[in-house]
């Protein structure tokens, strides 16, 4: 599995596990909490070892938003790590719920940030983050 394929699968699995954890709350199965935190650790390790995100800002991304690309990824990794730590340590159900909810909305903004250039600027940015089977839908 290439790094690109891993990142695509990790995005999808993280999103699914995040929704499961949000719906189930403290009663979530052990495997979902363990999978979410384990996958988070692997993704952060991949991010640190490879010194940044897999992709670079698209060529059509406006000059003011180009520096935001790397900052946005760092913010998301901090939020993912915080949510994973809160879900594993079970500090308090409300703290974990808030951390997962913030992560969910940051993830939605992350997705919008990829689909906006794809639809507004026609730069095919979302092709790099979706499996090839879904390219026909774009």
Image (cartoon, rainbow, N blue to C red):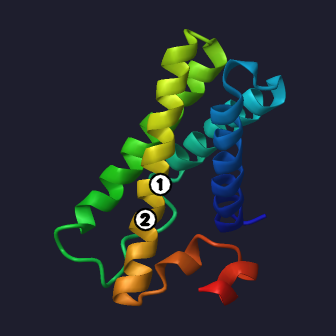
Residue 82 in view here:
no
- In this rendering, position of residue 81 left or right of residue 75: right
The location of residue 1, given as percent across then percent down, is 79, 64
> Relative to 129, is 118 on the left or the right?
left
> Residue 65: x and y, percent?
23, 67
- Residue topped by disc 1: 108
Secondary structure of the residue carrying tag 1 is helix
Question: Which one is in front, 102 or 37?
Answer: 102
Name the foreground residue: 113 vs 48. Answer: 113
In the depicted structure, whether residue 47 falls above or below residue 1? above
Q: Residue at x 57, y 22 (%)?
A: 85
Residue sitting at x 52%, y 37%: 80
Residue at 75% x, 20% y: name it.
27
- Residue 135 placement, left or right of 117: right
Instruction: Classify the position of the C terminus by image quarter.
Output: bottom right
Q: Residue farthest to the left?
A: 64
Name the quadrant containing residue 123.
Answer: bottom left
Dots 1, 2 in contact, CB < 8 A: yes
Residue 92, numbered label: none
Which percent across, then down, holds residue 75? Answer: 37, 43
Q: Is residue 90 above or below residue 79?
A: above
The relative height of residue 84 versus residue 53 in the rendered view (above or below) is above
Within-10-Å neighbours for mark 1: few <14, some 14–19, many 20+: few
Q: Which residue is denoted by mark 2 in the rendering?
A: 112
- Between 69 and 104, the one lying in front of the other is 104
Vertical placement of residue 94 versus 61, above or below: above
Q: Residues within 10 Å of mark 2 (few under 14, many from 20)?
A: few
Q: Where is residue 109 drawn, in percent x and y?
A: 41, 56
Please, what secondary structure does the residue beneath circle 2 have? helix
The residue at the far top in this view is 91
Q: Is residue 80 visible?
A: yes
Front residue of this view, candidates 110 and 51: 110
């Amino acid at each position: 599995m290439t790094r690109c394929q891993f990142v695509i699968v990790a995005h999808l699995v993280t999103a699914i596990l995040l929704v499961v954890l949000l719906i189930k709350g403290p009663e979530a199965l052990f495997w979902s909490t363990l999978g979410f935190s384990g996958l988070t650790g692997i993704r952060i390790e991949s991010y640190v070892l490879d010194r940044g995100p897999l992709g670079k800002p698209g060529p059509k991304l406006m000059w003011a938003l180009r520096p935001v690309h790397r900052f946005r990824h760092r913010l998301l990794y901090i939020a993912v790590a915080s949510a994973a730590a809160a879900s594993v340590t079970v500090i308090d159900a409300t703290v974990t719920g808030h951390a997962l909810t913030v992560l969910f909305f940051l993830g939605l903004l992350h997705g919008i940030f990829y689909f906006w250039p794809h639809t507004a600027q026609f730069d095919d940015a979302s092709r790099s983050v979706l499996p090839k089977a879904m390219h026909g839908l774009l």
